[in-house]
Image (spheres, rainbow, N blue to C red):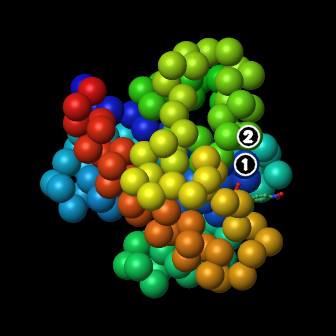
Amino acid sequence: MKTNVLFVCLGNICRSPLAEIIFTDYVKSKGREDEFYIDSAGTADYHTGEKAHHLSLKIARVHGHDLNFHRARQVEHHDFELFDWIVAMDSTNMSDLKHYKKHTHKILLMRDFDPAPDSLNVPDPYMMPENGFENVYQILLRSIDRFYNELLKK
Ligand code: 4NP
């Protein structure tokens, strides 16, 4: 049985695709990629079918990840059945997910795993310059390390 993990932001072009590729490469580095099914989605459909934001693609590349496979999609009802854990990037994503009123115990907040949180939210970098995306990357990197270790305890 795999552990199915879905990362969710608003548009599924900036934050959650980065979370998806960081976590995917993290479990690969542990030799445990066969134990996970990992995906990302957005609460909105604004960017359905689009590639990741060019600065998410760039920040991923700078850190040695390839995000070119990604195409944005919106969260679907079926996701609440399929995924064991649904990790929201901010508290708005989290409350939007809870409106589906399904399996709400599966919904987690990414920064609850951040060992050095300065906010509840992974900041939305959509209108930010490149350093906003780098900041998101660093937040995700340290949060995902702890998320992985907490998952092992579940
Ligand atoms: P994301 O960033 O939720 O991290 O993918 C955004 C992408 C698009 C928009 C807002 C945030 N938008 O308003 O189109």
Q: Nearer the viewer, residue 88 or 84?
A: 88
Q: Residues within 10 Å of mark 1 (few under 14, many from 20)?
A: many
Cβ of disc 1 within 8 Å of ligand 1?
A: yes
Residue at x 56% of width, y 81% of height: 58
Estimate the x, y position of residue 57 in percent, counting from the top left.
57, 75
Q: Secondary structure at mark 1?
A: loop
Label number found at residue 87: none
Image quadrant of ligand 1? bottom right
Image-based side of 124 in relation to 82, left or right:
right
Residue at x 51% of width, y 55% of height: 117
Vertical relation: 149 (above or below) 59: above
Image-based side of 74 in relation to 144, left or right:
right
Vertical relation: 81 (above or below) 149: above
Estimate the x, y position of residue 116 in percent, counting from the top left.
45, 58
Q: CA distance from mark 1 to mark 2?
A: 9 Å
Which corner quadrant holds the C terminus? top left
Estimate the x, y position of residue 130 in percent, counting from the top left.
65, 82
Q: Secondary structure at mark 2?
A: helix
Circles 1 and 2: CB distance less than 8 Å?
yes
The quarter holding residue 13 reads: bottom right
Label number found at residue 92: 2
Instruction: Write down the residue under mark 1.
Output: 10
Disc 1 residue type (three-letter): Leu
* Residue farthest to the left, as pictured: 31
Disc 2 residue type (three-letter): Thr
Tell me the mark number nearer the camera, choosing from 1 and 2. 2
Residue at x 36% of width, y 45% of height: 147
Vertical relation: 42 (above or below) 54: above
The quarter holding residue 153 reads: top left
